[in-house]
Structures are given as C-alpha cells and as structure tokens.
Image (cartoon, coloured by chain):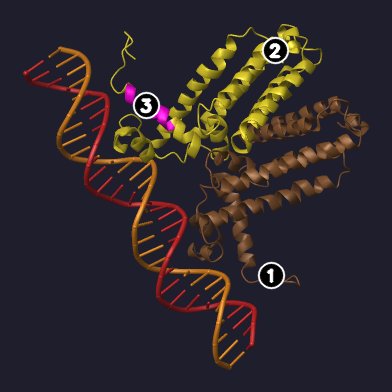
Chain colours: A brown, B yellow, C orange, D red
Amino acid sequence: MTQDGRLIRGERTRGAVLDQALVLATVAGLDGLSLSQVADALGVSKSGLFAHWRSKEALQLAVIDQARAQWRDQVIRPALEVPAGVRRLWAVHDRRIAFYEARVLPGGCFFANAHFEFNARPGAIRDRLAGELTDWMTFLTGLAGEAAGLGELRPGVDPAGLAYHVESLGVCAVMQAPVVGAAPTYAQARRQLLEHLRAVTTDPTILEQT
Amino acid sequence: MTQDGRLIRGERTRGAVLDQALVLATVAGLDGLSLSQVADALGVSKSGLFAHWRSKEALQLAVIDQARAQWRDQVIRPALEVPAGVRRLWAVHDRRIAFYEARVLPGGCFFANAHFEFNARPGAIRDRLAGELTDWMTFLTGLAGEAAGLGELRPGVDPAGLAYHVESLGVCAVMQAPVVGAAPTYAQARRQLLEHLRAVTTDPTILEQT
DNA sequence: TATATTTACGAACGGTCGGTCGGATTGTAG
DNA sequence: CTACAATCCGACCGACCGTTCGTAAATATA
C-alpha cells in the first residue's frame, strides 16, 4: 500500500491470486498447486503470474505468508481479546477448532498439510514452514508461561508441557476431522483439553467452563 | 506364495517395488510418487510395472497395504508381547516413537503424510487411508477398554478419551520430530504420556516406570 | 502530453508425467 | 520337447507442468 492507503499497482491482483492459491494449495497440496489452475480460476493468464512472483517457489512462499496472516486475524487476534492466563490458552484452542469447524479453508489445516508434505524435503519452503511451527510453539509456550506467572497453574505443572499438550490435541483434531466426520472429533478435542486444564489449573473460570 | 512356500513368478519384483515405492512415497508424497523414479531406482522399466498393477492408483493402494504390514510387524506385534492393560497401551506409544527414532522410513510417518495429503481429495485412496485411521483408533480404544476391564483405570476415566490422548501425543511427536530435531520432541512425547498415565491409572508398573 | 515502467497476454519451449503397444524373454505345465 | 502364459522391455503417445519471450495495454512520472 501507499502511504495514504491506496492500493499500489497490481496489489488487488496480487491479493486475489494469493487468496485463490491458498485455497487450492490447501486442497491439492502446496507442491501440487498448479499455476494453470490458479490462473484459470481467476480468469487471468498463467504467464501474467510471473510479473508478480519470479517463480512458483516464490508464490508458494507468499502463500505461506498469506496463510499466516489469515491465521493471525481469525485465530490469534480474537484469542488475545481474552484476558491472559489459562483462559487465553483455552481461547486459542477453542478459536483454533472453531476455525476448522467454520471450514474457512475447504482442505482443512493448511499448515498441517504443508508441514507433512515438506517433512523430508529440504529447501526454502521446508525451512519457512519449520519456522512457522517454531513460532507457533513459542507463542503457545509463552501463553502457558504467562498463566504460570499469574499463579494459575498448580505446583509442579510444566508450562512447556502444557503448551505441547494443547498443540497435540489441536493437531489430532485437525487430522481426524475432515475425514472421519467433523462434530465428534471437534467436541472431543475441546472436552479433552478442558479436562486437562481442570487438572492443572487453579483458575476458577476454567473450572466453571462447560 | 505357493503352497510349499516358494515365491511365485514375479513376487520378488513385486515386493521390491513396493518396498522402494513406500520409501519414495513417504518422502515425496503418495501422489508425488513417480513411477519413473521407482523403476529407475530398481533398474527396471516403467512399463514393466504395469504388468503387476493396472494403474498408478492400484500401486498406491498396494503401497498403503505395504505400510500397514510394516507397521504391524514393527510396532503392533512387539507391543502385543507386553501383557494387556495400561502397560500395553504404553508399549504401543513407546514402540511407535521408537519406530520414528529408528528412521525406518526417511520421510517420517507414512500414514500421517498420506493422510494430510489426501485430506480433502475424495476417492479410493482417501477412503482407504480413512479406514486405516479408523482401524487404528479402534485398536487403541480396544487396548484402553482392556485396561479398564482389568480395573487399571481410576474411576471416571473414559477409555476412549485415553485412546484419543495417546493418539494426539503420537501425532504431535511425529509432526515436530523430523523438522525441528528429533530427540527433544520424542522424549517430550514419552514423558507427557507417562505423566498422563500416572494420573489415570492404578497400575503400579506404570507408576514405577521411568 | 510525452515518456518510462509495470502489468498482462498468447504462443511456444523443454521436460516429466501416467499410460499403451508390439514384441522379446522367461518360467511353467503337459 | 512344445505350448502357453506371465513378465519385461524400448519406443512412443497425449496431457500437463513451470517457464520464457515478444508484444500490447495500462499506469505512473515528467
């Protein structure tokens, strides 16, 4: 954007391409993403994409950033409106599952899909995805540490372990949901974490949560 | 095989192809698997593969079966040598993580990779993978139910929830390990489940486990 | 208005993909 | 041995891939 808020040349196209590419990549995979399909879906020419990104890999990296922005706006930001502590940790888990329930992306969790796709394929994309995961775990661990600092965790409870716990339940929920059927697994993921939080926290608002 | 145990014609080739294809598919993805690469890696012709499987999809389905057989031999079977109950549930988790630590497949967990890959892509392969996941969860739930039947779970502990818990920690361990670095996550996954089992079981052998 | 730069396009390129085909080779049964 | 079927191969096909190029339109700058 320019300083006065107007879109610079081509920015509208760039955004539309990224939105479309994110959807297609979440379904077909980040590598299975076809530039032809992206172009056709938007009614633009395939060669025109190379005016914005020098290669497919550059577009793929931009798609990762787009996914992160979407995640920030629709999961992290709403959760940060909840007061810090165990309640906020719970809010992250809850918003996260709500994000999949809402089927914002038809292919499930973009990051999980992409992460497993590039598991064993070194390169810029793998590194970027690994960085995203590291940042995410740092974020969760920070929230757990905040809760500990507020004295909301029972003695002996490891904040990092709690963050790992939240992450594993989230990943497992994402894994089963799109295939086996949504509702039971989502509910299960919520109930499981709530049970665990009740076991490790002294925060009365969690104990009262249903 | 024939009745007297000898290999029938082509069975050696068939097995070698499946082994190679499983390795390549775990790295490049089940769909990213290239028949040319499989053939080249084995020094056979690509067209010869079509004498054994009528299409790429048929080979992909066979690869899934191969992965299941490997999983049965190296994870399930050893765990079943442990007495039933919470100890066996723990053994499954332990053998599972050991399987990834041993890097039997260079690409991490084949089932997790394939599952996320075909998340949102209906068809025979997606259905087969979903079936594998269902069977696996049924297996875990059965083990947890056994433990409950033996009176090893504290009152109020839900066996299905325990099985879900084991699965989520396993998935999360697999997710992080190949990228962020192996040892810490593997150890974390073990410690996390051990803590949880100590909270839900009355079995002294688990309480003594280190 | 005139100029420079970005954006977009159609056409084409080399390469890889899954798959087919006819024929050569191999193993098995009679 | 002969006869038959399974196996394997090289050559080839059409489709799709990411990418490049020359060029035309659109936009910013002067």
Residue B36 pos. (x, y %): 36, 40
Corner quadrant of residue C29 = top left
What residue sits 67% from the left and 26% below the top? B187
Number of residues whose C-alpha sits closer than 10 Å to that of mark 2, classed few (under 14), some (14–19) or many (20 or more): many
Q: Earlier in the sequence, mark 3 or mark 2?
A: 3
Magenta residues, start to end: B12-21
Is B171 on the left-hand or right-hand side of A141? left
- Residue in the foreground of this view, choosing between B175 and B124: B175
Q: Is residue B210 above or below residue A52?
A: above
Residue A85 pos. (x, y %): 87, 38
Q: Residue under mark 2: which chain is it in?
A: B
Q: Distance of mark 1 from mark 2, alpha carbons?
A: 60 Å
Question: What secondary structure is marked by label 3?
Answer: helix
- Residue in the foreground of this view, choosing between C7 and D15: C7
Residue B63 appears anywhere in the view: yes
Q: Which residue is mark 2?
A: B86
What residue sits 61% from the left and 69% below the top? A10
- Residue in the foreground of this view, choosing between A100 and A93: A93
User: What amino acid does circle 1 point to?
Assistant: Leu
On whether residue B18 falls in the magenta region, the answer is yes
Q: Residue under mark 1: which chain is it in?
A: A
Q: Distance of mark 3 from mark 1, alpha carbons?
A: 57 Å
Q: Which residue is mark 3?
A: B16
Image depth: mark 1 or mark 2 in front: 2
